[in-house]
Amino acid sequence: MKANPKKTTRWSISPSQKKILDALFKSIPIKNPRTVIDAGSGRTSIHYLAHRFKNIVITGIVYPGDRRKLEPILACVPEDNYQIAQTDIRKFNPRQKSEIILAHLFLGEATKFGRNTFPGVLKKLLSLSSKYLVIVNLTSDNIDYVTLIKEIKRKGVIVSLVHASTESGNDCIGMVIKLQ
Ligand SMILES: C[S@@+](CC[C@H](N)C(=O)[O-])C[C@H]1O[C@@H](n2cnc3c(N)ncnc32)[C@H](O)[C@@H]1O
């Protein structure tokens, strides 16, 4: 699905989400990546990436038919340098290696669709070929942190860790993983 040029809804990114994403992306040494994926896309993450990396086309992944996310993206995101792939991440096999993958509030929904399990989705995310993986979760998300850290250790190293509060008072934890 291509970006829709008719955006009518007034919307702006949450300042706290922008702040946490800025802090995380600042710590990634690749300033002009050629391939960036938004795993578990939504208006905040796809807007952030498309705005930050204006010279490339960002690929966002949304679970097939997830209109909760598809419609706000099309209505709110002013950039047109993105495309949305509707696919279960378990079946996502990009031809090109990525330089950066963002999983923004994605893992909290790992078990929402199909028969996906948290370890299954996490292993697939960590096996996607990329130099860096950025993960952002709310502490209120249903995340198995023991499994998360164990799997990260198998695949790479956490090079940056950020904590922030959202406007609604939720705690948000973000990390940058340098993959091996
Ligand atoms: C809470 S939303 C992410 C929020 C989003 N990053 C934003 O900025 O608004 C979770 C996203 O993960 C996607 N998702 C959940 N399970 C998935 C799966 N197995 N494969 C692909 N996408 C999935 C949903 O369709 C949705 O786009």
Image: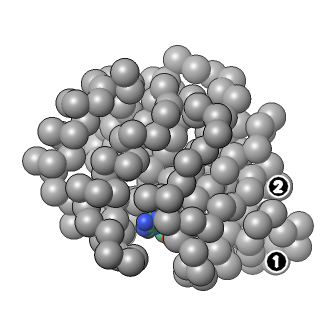
> Relative to 88, is 136 on the left or the right?
left
SS for tag 1? loop
Please, what is the three-letter code of the amino acid marked with disc 1?
A: Thr
Quarter of the N terminus within the rendering: bottom right
Residue 139 screen position, x and y as percent: 23, 59
Residue at numbered disc 2: 80
Please, what is the three-letter code of the amino acid marked with disc 2?
A: Asp
* Mark 1 neighbour density, 10 Å: few (under 14) some (14–19) many (20 or more): few
SS for tag 2? loop
Residue found 44% across the figure and 58% down from its top: 90
Residue found 25% across the figure and 61% down from its top: 118
Residue 29's place in the image compared with 88, above or below, is above
Residue found 30% across the figure and 26% down from its top: 156
The reply to whether the C-beta atoms of the residues labelled 2 and 1 are less than 8 Å apart is no
Residue found 31% across the figure and 47% down from its top: 123
> Relative to 116, is 58 on the left or the right?
right
Residue 22 screen position, x and y as percent: 51, 37
Residue furthest out toward the left: 146
Using the numbered discs, state the Cα–Cα distance from disc 2 to disc 1 in whole angstroms.
14 Å
Residue furthest out toward the right: 5
Residue 15 visible at all:
no
Asked if disc 1 is less than 8 Å from ligand 1, the answer is no
Residue 125 screen position, x and y as percent: 40, 47
Quarter of the C terminus within the rendering: top left
Camera-side residue of 11 and 111: 111
Camera-side residue of 44 and 90: 90
Camera-side residue of 17 and 49: 49
First along the sequence among labels 2 and 1: 1
> Relative to 9, is 152 on the left or the right?
left
Residue at numbered disc 1: 8
